[in-house]
Amino acid sequence: MEENRIAPQAPAAPNLPGPFAVGVYARKLQAWMRERARVQLIGEVTGVGRSKVQAYFELRDGEGAVPCAIWLNDLEKAGLDGASLRDGAEVVIAGGLDYYPGGGQASPNFCFRATHVRLAGEGDLIARLEALRKQMRAEGLFELQKQLHRPALPKAIGVVTAERGAARRDLLAGLERRGWGGSLVWGFAPVQDRHAAPAIGRALQDLAARPEVEAIVVTRGGGSLADLWAFCDETLCRTVAMLRVPVISAVGHERDSTLIDDVAAVACSTPTHAAEAAVPLDCRAARESLERCALALRRAGEGAVETRSRHLGALARGPARALQRERGKLNQRIREIRAASERGLADRASSQKRIGTLVLERARRRAAGADMEKRRDALHRAAVALRAHEPERTLERGYALVEGEGGEPLTSAVEAGAAERISLRFSDGRVRAKPEQRDEA
């Protein structure tokens, strides 16, 4: 069974005027554009081409491009020939917007229709340069390179210049006068056309990527500001400001001032000056100074050797005298030591003799003392025994001693009876008595 399909409806058209015929709209657009204000533009010419009736090209700068066209008769009125309107030329054009509607067999075309054209003068370029300079200074791009360290004696230097330019020869001559013996890494690039700025930027980046390169010199000879305009390119100058390697610019002569001079680490007036800035140390003068110092050091060394040799000669004769003096001192000390030894031995013998005498004396004393002690003990024992037989002891026990008139002891009754008087001695005194009749035992 065949299904019935419903075709989808187109969405509702927006609420806009029309539709108009394309040709009507194209003519309206052309009229509207031609009514716009007429102005002057400045930029670099690229892509120049010609037809039978007009010349067409693009006008560019670092931020954009506009397609342009000029009738050949207007170009002739401006006094410019075919060689003047060329790629890379800086021009100022006057005109306004234009639009060609085309047709059934022709394509439409938009362009800036120039009615007047002239080569840009110094004033035009200086105005653009000052605007760029002011903008980049406000962004702080002028200080980045100047903060980089520049070695006093780099081992390798990169150089961006034309391969056969006079600046190359001047730079080599300047480095030779400095006596520098390092390595040069060349980055050849065009230095004057619309392709110069991108080529110089690539060469700078390639050189900065090489680890051995310690500084980069960008140089070319003098010329007009238009000739040097590649070195005022905004993209190139921003590239220089961001490099890790210090860049030394030597573009033009002393009176020339380009934007790359402002962003570079050092701006030099000539390639010779750039050689001195790239190698701050004058190697030739340093070698001469080193040779002078070496010569002075050699002379000082020779003088010192001669002085020291004389001193050593005097010292060589001195040891014999010094040895003789020391030998005399040694002999004197030997005599003193011998005499001291003899005195010491005599003193030691005398001391030992005294000590022996004292020891013997003490031994005799000890021996005599022991004998005396024995004798004292014996005497004491004898005294004790004698005292035990003493009459006094007997008297102390209550006895009495009978004595005659002369004090002699009377030991018998016969003697006592015969005596006229007697005395009785007690332990505490005497008593006199007269004997009476004696009793017989």
Image (cartoon, rainbow, N blue to C red):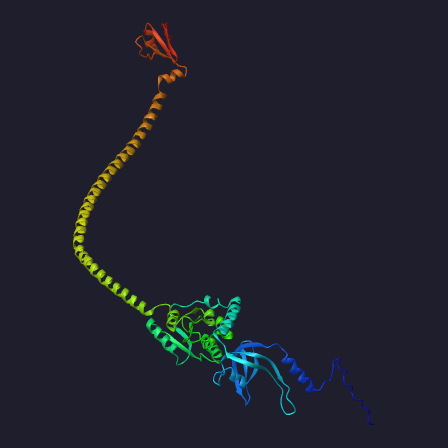
161 sits left or right of 32 in the view: left
Give residue 21's quadrant in the image: bottom right
Numbered marks: total: 0
Q: Quadrant of the C terminus?
A: top left
Q: Nearer the viewer, residue 152 or 9?
A: 9
Can residue 205 be seen by looking at this rendering? no
Q: Residue furthest front?
A: 77
- Which residue is pictured at 31% across the width and 68% down the height? 285
Residue 343, placed above or below residue 293: above
Can residue 373 be seen by looking at this rendering? yes
Q: Nearer the viewer, residue 12 or 301?
A: 12
Residue 312 rendering spot, x and y as whole percentages: 20, 58
- Which residue is pictured at 69% across the width and 84% down the height? 25
Give residue 223's quadrant in the image: bottom left
Residue 243 rendering spot, x and y as whole percentages: 48, 72
295 sits left or right of 69 in the view: left
Residue 203 rendering spot, x and y as whole percentages: 46, 78
254 sits left or right of 330 in the view: right
Q: Quadrant of the N terminus?
A: bottom right
Q: Residue furthest right?
A: 1
